Each structure stands twice: as structure tokens, then as C-alpha cells.
Image (cartoon, rainbow, N blue to C red):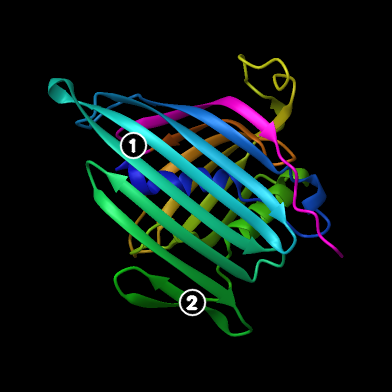
Amino acid sequence: MFSNKCINAFLIIYLLLISPSFSSQLLSHKATYILNVENIKNSFLEGGQGQTFFEIQEVCDGWNVREEYVLIYELPNKKSAKSFSSFTTFENKTSTKHSFQLTEKSDLNGENDYQGFVEKNKKNISGSMINRNIKKLTFNKNTLFPLEHLKRVIQKAKAGQTIFNADVFFGNEESNPIKTVSTVISNKRRAKVHNNKNVSAVMVWPIKIAFYSKAENITSPDYEISLELDEVGVVYSYKVDYGDFEVIAKLKDFKVIEKQVCNN
């Protein structure tokens, strides 16, 4: 269902570069999006509406990211089901440390609550995921963290390159924290924003991202995201395609926030 996958889908949109050469261009901000379930094909869903709140803030040693959403699914016989999620992450400015915490409540999928951290060393990436038990994590050192991955996406977009593939650790799914991510970047154009004259003239990259499970013989993506991303990390609209239905998100409110003042 949309619940836990949405976290991954939405956070991917925002987790961008924080190296010294790029961090000054990334905007600390809050954004609110209106969500609608549309284009339903082979699903028991009949519709759905909701809202996502997102915040990203530069702090002295990295970036804090928080995303919360609530979605009310429309079910047959005029019934409904609620889904709520809160996902927070931190990644340091060298992309060697990444921590995460998920709280999720869903009428369809039940409750889930866990946290964890991972860290890179010269040999591999290791850490722990803590729920009812402690699960040790170890994986290939070439796996990227979210900020690290989006850094490369932005760099390739600026260089005019169009395709980028990588394995990325997100931590939003207990059983499958790593995805193979395929990104296609299109030429810049004006954002398709019709309800906010202040951002309608912004230039964006239309980007399409497909997420694949690491299991063998999987040839179709778990889901795909299409989004509009500008050079300071603001997303003006996005669509999550799960095959059986889509979730359309449109920017409602936007506010710039101050980054943390550091004594260095």
C-alpha cells in the first residue's frame, strides 16, 4: 500500500547535496502539499485525499529532515481508512553517517515504529535497526545514502546528463532498506504551478525516478516518482505511480526557514 512506500518516495524528492560547494544553494524550507489518489486501475481503492508536511533544515554538522503525512483512503460501500506517518532523518555533511526514525499508523497496515543508524567506513557500511529487536545492518560500501545520491543527481542535471543508476539506502522499509534507483532527467522548463504566482516562473528539471527491490529477477519497479525540482531543492509538484493507482501532490504552502547559526 501507499503508507510506508510513500515515505521513501517523498523523501527522495528532497534529500539533496550538502557538500561545501553545494550546500549554500540548498534552501532550508517548509512545504505543504495536497494529496489526491487518482488514475485507479486494479485496486480496491475508490479515491483518497490527504496532506504532506515537509521540512528540511541545514544545521551545523548536516541536515535535519522531517516529513509527515496523513491520507484518507476512500473504500467501497462509503467506507474509509486513515494512514499517518512521521519520518525523520539526519545525514552529516560528508554523507558518512545517516540516522532515521519512523512512526506509522494505518487502518490498513497497522502500526510500526522503529529507528536506526548506519555509518560508512573503509570496508563497508554498518549499523543497526531497532524495533522490538535489534537488527544488525551491513552492506556494500558503494551503496549511497539519500543525500549522497541526490547530490549526484543534481550534479548530473547541471551537467546536462540524463541517466543515473545507483543502489541507495533509505531505511524506510524494515525488510528492504536498500533500493536500486534509476533516474531519468529531462531538460529544464518552467514549473507547472498555477496557484502561486511567486513560483510559476521558476525553472525546474522534470525528473522521473524508478525504485526496484534488490531481490533477484525483479524487472518491474516497486513504484515510480515524477517530480519538478529546482536548483535549491524545492519540489513544486510530484506524482507517485504504484501501477494500480497514482498519488498526485501539488504545492499548497511554502516558507523559507533560517539555517542554524554555527560558530565556525
Q: Is residue 129 visible?
A: yes
Q: Return the x and y of residue 123 as percentages of the image width and height.
A: 58, 85
Q: Which mark is residue 172?
A: none
Residue 253 vertical placement versus 128 (above, below): above
Q: Return the x and y of residue 58 as percentages of the image width and height.
A: 71, 52
Q: In the rendered structure, which amino acid carries the disc numbered 1?
A: Gly
Residue 164 vertical placement versus 240 (above, below): below
Q: Is residue 17 visible?
A: no
Determine the residue positioned at 49% across, 77% down.
127
Mark 2 Cα within 10 Å, few/some/many (few <14, many 20+)? Answer: some
Residue 45 versus residue 106: which sits nearer the camera?
A: 106
Residue 22 versus residue 34: which sits nearer the camera?
A: 34
Furthest-left residue in this view: 77
Which residue matches tag 1?
A: 243
Residue 247 versus residue 166: which sits nearer the camera?
A: 247
Left or right: 180 as drawn, with respect to 14? left
Disc 2/disc 1 C-alpha distance (Å): 33 Å
Q: Return the x and y of residue 82 as percentages of the image width and height.
A: 28, 35
Q: Quadrant of the C terminus?
A: bottom right
Element under disc 2: strand
Magenta span contains residue 227: no
- Residue 80 is drawn in which quadrant? top left
Magenta span contains residue 255: yes
Determine the residue positioned at 35% across, 76% down.
134
Which residue matches tag 2?
A: 127
Point out the stretch of residues depicted in magenta: 242-264
